[in-house]
Image (cartoon, grey):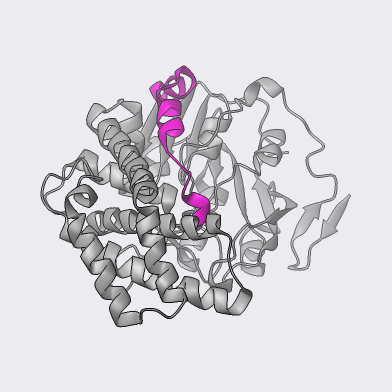
Amino acid sequence: MIIRSDSGCLADENFCSKVNDTTIATGLEPIIKWPGGKESELVHIVKNLPSDFERFFDPFVGGGSVLMGINANQYIVNDLSSELIDFYKCIQTIDLKFFEYAESMNRSFENAGRFTSDNYKYLSDIYFQLKDDKIDKKELSKKISDFVSKNAKSINSMIDFITTDNHFFIQELSSTLARKFQRMKDLELQKGDMPESDVFDNIETAIKGSLYMTFRYLYNNPNGLENQLKTALFFFIRNYAYSGMFRYNSAGKFNVPYGGIAYNRKLTRKKLNYYHSEQVQNIMSKTVFENVDFETFLNIYQPTENDFVFLDPPYDTEFSTYAKNAFTKDDQIRLANCLINNCQAKWMLVIKNTSFICSLYANHTGINIKSFDKEYTVSFMNRNNKSVTHLLITNYV
């Protein structure tokens, strides 16, 4: 039965009734968390794949949920984010320097945890003095500054891949601890005393958050850094930024804060081991990575009727800029024209249901539109509703 959605787009009520051979699904995790990742939608995607194809194409590979999620003889994928493609290539080639830097950042994070435990009593005593009004803000800043200066050597040694004194980390830690203690006091005034375990967690968050901010500073100021270190910083930031968000200020600097207490026990070591696994390396060995505009990508490779193209472009929303690359309505029009008029392969487009998108794809012969619901964990600055309808558009049945 065909139904009409609120946007006027046709949708199939019996969506996902077709089930393909389960051998096409790998069960593998995506390579990295990415805005709009399709891990949770794979059940819909796999069930609606064409029955057979030779090569798999993805012009907007992102975190690789679909790349890693289905079997194919060859994968040819693309993304406009050069940092992301460099990251994939480090995994593909098992670049030892990249993995060494990434593991060093794991050790730094663990060092920050040990530093918290070793200095918790002293730091919590400072906090309780503030809480009990035995010291004011000025005295708080002085005590923290003295503590950081006294422990500068061990603070600097947390980051073992930086051999020079890290003045940014020292300054960041001083200011972050002072702000955190003041926020803790304000929170306890509003809601009552917090358990001591929460006091510890907040102090650890200030220390690990300062480490994150230091890595973010290096990521935003990469001059003179090795390419593998830049890529390792990208990997770290992607894993520890709040909710895996992308956001850049007017100067082009990444400015998403640390994820907070929930991230304090997080390590990337399991992911790094995953990248070395036989299953991942098997897919990497069959994959070509490109870093060009989607239309250029499709024109270069000219997918045939025996191939399959999966597309997960940035959505038609106010917030459609990922990794500094805007995707406008004109780009959506270019994409629709490319798919409907020029693409010989079977293709599947997954995108948010809007009137504009429906106007591009509805009422074309041979274009099939189905729908499913999607729940977002985070609605960034209220630019996305947490509950939305997505479209699955194909040029095949």
Residue 344 appears in the figure: no
Left or right: residue 142 versus residue 206 is: left
Residue furthest toward the right?
1
Q: Position of residue 379 (x, y in %)?
A: 59, 65
Q: Position of residue 292 (x, y in %)?
A: 34, 47
User: In front: 96, or 293?
Assistant: 96
- The part of the chain drawn in magenta is 261-286
Q: Position of residue 1 (x, y in %)?
A: 89, 49
Residue 133 appears in the figure: yes
The residue positioned 31% from the left and 54% from the top of the image is 211
Secondary structure predominantly adopted by residues drawn in magenta: helix
Q: Quadrant of the C terminus?
A: top right
Image height of 184 relative to 93, above or below: below
* Residue 88 image-quadrant placement: top left
Image height of 92 relative to 214, above or below: above
Q: Position of residue 130 (x, y in %)?
A: 41, 75
The residue positioned 56% from the left and 79% from the top of the image is 189
User: In front: 305, or 143?
Assistant: 143
User: In front: 379, or 357?
Assistant: 379
